[in-house]
Amino acid sequence: MTPVFDYSPYSATYQERPEYVPSVIHSVLRTAGVRPGDLVCDIGAGSGHLTEPLLEYGLRVDAVEPTAAMRATGERRTARFGDVTWHNGTGETSGRPSGHYRLVTFGSSFDRTDRLAALKETARILEPDGFFACLWNHRDLEDPLQARIERLIHERVPGYAYGTRRTDQRPVIEESGLFESPVQLSGRKVFRLRADAWCDAWASHATLGEQAGQQFDEVLDGIRELVRGAGEEYIDVPYVTRAWIARANREGAGR
Ligand SMILES: C[S@@+](CC[C@H](N)C(=O)[O-])C[C@H]1O[C@@H](n2cnc3c(N)ncnc32)[C@H](O)[C@@H]1O
């Protein structure tokens, strides 16, 4: 299997993160034309943030996740559903059978892969005419508190960058030649969250953790101070869920 970035240090508080905007998930599922009972492969399924709404919709899900600690949390979280099976694997080498799925999803995990290799693997395991979808939850950086947090991060971690998790996914999907032109969907929701729990969840932010290195704890303390400065037990955090969804070309799928 391809070596993967070890997500274990970030797994403990990951489940404190807010859910994806439900209307975007429903639009993705409508665009893919999936119905309850259809089989979906959720890759980089982690602690089950996307797996859970897929199961709630009535889909059967094969969840693929390379990090044991994330997989264990995901398994616990989805244990009440009968129609989910968890597997060790990656986006590039999923270990799943060819031509098998109506839909393959990547919830905040496509940026963790070699994206072209993951698209090739996705086309292999999809049924002809099946769909690929990738999505992320982005904090709305126009919000005043989020703008302050963003400034703090950039001050403490010079050159901080989000990598491909905040970029347009259309070019790589089109470049692969394996999919039709993607549809882009997005939706915003303000989540009322417990301030402490939201601060704790920053410890699961691998993109920041990787770049902050030894400064990570200091940055997390700075964020906690800013949030405490607002003096509220609950905070309102606006998130935008952004999704790209594309149908496999007949020539590409199931190979
Ligand atoms: C940000 S978490 C997302 C978890 C979950 N899908 C969600 O929607 O919140 C990214 C996940 O991708 C996994 N990952 C890392 N490298 C990967 C790879 N090459 N292929 C698939 N998943 C990978 C990590 O272990 C982690 O669980």
Image: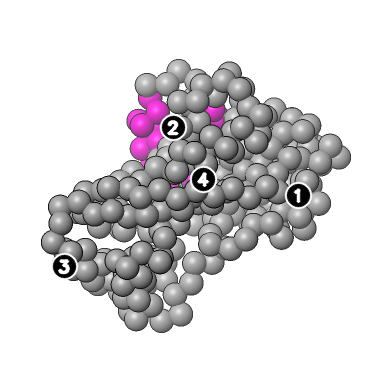
Helix, strand or loop at disc 2? helix
Marks 2 and 3, the one that precedes in the sequence: 2
Identify residue for label 3: 229
User: Marks 1 and 2, Cα distance to the nearest angstrom?
Assistant: 28 Å
Marks 1 and 2, the one that precedes in the sequence: 2
Would residue 91 be visible to someone looking at this image? no
Identify residue for label 1: 181
Q: Is mark 3 within 8 Å of ligand 1?
A: no
Q: Residue at coordinates 61% horizontally, 32% vertically from top-left? A: 30
User: Marks 2 and 4, Cα distance to the nearest angstrom?
Assistant: 11 Å
| Mark 2 neighbour class, 10 Å CA radius: few under 14, some 14 to 19, many 20 or more | many
Q: Indicate left or right for 116 with 212 as reference.
A: right
Helix, strand or loop at disc 4? strand
Marks 3 and 4, the one that precedes in the sequence: 4
Image depth: mark 2 or mark 3 in front: 3
Query: Which mark identifies residue 159?
Result: none
Q: Residue at coordinates 45% horizontally, 57% vertically from top-left? A: 138
Relative to 153, residue 20 above or below? above
Identify residue for label 2: 52
Marks 1 and 3, the one that precedes in the sequence: 1
Helix, strand or loop at disc 1? loop
Image depth: mark 1 or mark 4 in front: 1
Q: Amino acid at mark 4?
A: Gly
Q: Amino acid at mark 1?
A: Ser
Q: Nearer the viewer, residue 11 or 23?
A: 23
Q: Indicate left or right for 129 with 200 as reference.
A: right
Helix, strand or loop at disc 3? helix
Which span is picked out in magenta? 60-79
